[in-house]
Image (cartoon, rainbow, N blue to C red):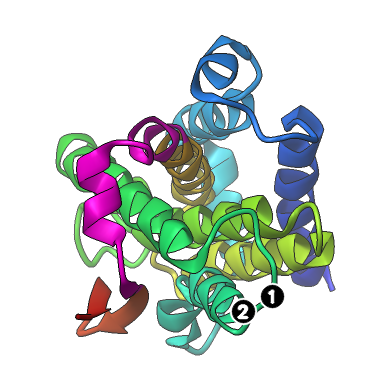
């Protein structure tokens, strides 16, 4: 029961905090940059993760959360919100963007988060709870999951807000399972969540900046689709285009 409450509270708090600092209408690039609260939640999560990285709290919590068995559900759950989002939009469920645009935002988000997560792992050299290596901080799975969850929230917050909750529950479950599998500390999960959310928020700003460029319009003209997939422990973006 304690584990379930931890998962629910973590997921719902992240979702509600983002919703509170968000705006009802779509913000342009300048307005988002000038909005001091736009990156408040990601920064808070990253800072909290950094503070807890050297605390006894993370060790004590890990003892309570770690499970007796292992699962690989988190490997697939991390991209589920993005896959569901693009799948629903492809089937005609209205989102904030067209399916290809959503896929482009997700791709930009992945470029951003991967340029942050992997260097940080090499710099911080935090040992994993299971002592397997020194690449614990931050959690890459959790980063990917919350980037996808934030994408799902952005796309459906107006017409289907409950889908946003579903995305954050899946992301929260991913972070929890990383701890359950003894692969990450709570500090890794919190920092990963912040980086993931922040990456998608930043990706949205980048997309808004380039979407009207004529070369970009020419690139996406026609029947195209970008689909996320998970292969051999790697997140892949598959692009198909019919000429």
Residue 184 percent coordinates (x, y): 42, 59
Residue under the image location 67 percent in, 55 percent down: 153
Residue 206 is one of the magenta-drawn residues? yes
Q: Which residue is mark 2?
A: 88
Q: Badges 1 and 2: C-beta atoms under 8 Å apart?
A: yes
Q: Is residue 96 above or below residue 52?
A: below
Residue under the image location 58 percent in, 71 percent down: 85
Q: Secondary structure at mark 2?
A: helix
Residue under the image location 84 percent in, 74 percent down: 1
Residue 107, quarter of picture: bottom left
Report whether residue 90 is seen.
Answer: yes
Residue 55 percent coordinates (x, y): 51, 34
Q: How many marks?
A: 2
Q: Where is the C terminus found, in terms of image quarters?
A: bottom left
Residue 72 percent coordinates (x, y): 43, 87
| Residue 45 located left or right of residue 74 | right
Q: Residues within 10 Å of mark 1 (few under 14, many from 20)?
A: some
Which region is colored magenta?
A: 205-225
Q: Residues within 10 Å of mark 2 (few under 14, many from 20)?
A: some
Residue 118 is one of the magenta-drawn residues? no
Magenta stretch: dominant secondary structure: helix
Of residues 46 and 162, which is closer to you in this image? 162
Of residues 127 and 108, which is closer to you in this image? 108
Which of the marked residues, 1 or 2, is nearer the chain's N terminus? 2
Residue 157 percent coordinates (x, y): 76, 53
Q: Is residue 87 above or below residue 193?
A: below
Q: Secondary structure at mark 1?
A: loop
| Residue 11 located left or right of residue 172 | right
Checking the image for residue 93, the label placed there is: 1
Residue under the image location 20 percent in, 52 percent down: 134
Between marks 1 and 2, how big is the CA–CA gap?
5 Å
């Amino acid at each position: 029961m304690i584990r379930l409450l931890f998962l629910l509270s973590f997921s719902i708090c992240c979702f509600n905090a983002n919703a509170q600092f968000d705006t009802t209408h779509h913000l342009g690039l300048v307005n988002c940059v000038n909005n001091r609260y736009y990156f408040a939640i990601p920064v808070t999560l990253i800072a909290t993760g950094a503070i807890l990285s050297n605390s006894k709290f993370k060790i004590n919590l890990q003892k309570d959360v770690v499970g007796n068995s292992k699962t690989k559900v988190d490997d697939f759950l991390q991209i589920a919100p993005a896959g569901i989002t693009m799948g629903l939009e492809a089937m005609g469920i209205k989102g904030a963007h067209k399916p290809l645009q959503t896929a482009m935002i997700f791709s930009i988000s992945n470029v951003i988060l991967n340029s942050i997560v992997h260097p940080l792992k090499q710099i911080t050299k935090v040992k994993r709870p299971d002592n397997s290596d020194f690449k614990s901080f931050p959690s890459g799975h959790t980063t990917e999951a919350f980037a996808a969850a934030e994408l799902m929230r952005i796309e459906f917050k107006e017409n289907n807000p409950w889908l946003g909750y579903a995305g954050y529950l899946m992301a929260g479950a991913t972070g929890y399972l990383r701890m359950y599998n003894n692969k990450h500390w709570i500090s890794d999960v919190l920092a990963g969540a912040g980086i993931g959310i922040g990456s998608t928020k930043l990706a949205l700003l980048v997309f808004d900046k380039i979407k009207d460029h004529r070369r970009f319009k020419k690139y996406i003209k026609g029947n195209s689709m970008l689909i996320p997939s998970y292969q051999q422990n790697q997140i892949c973006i598959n692009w198909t285009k019919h000429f």
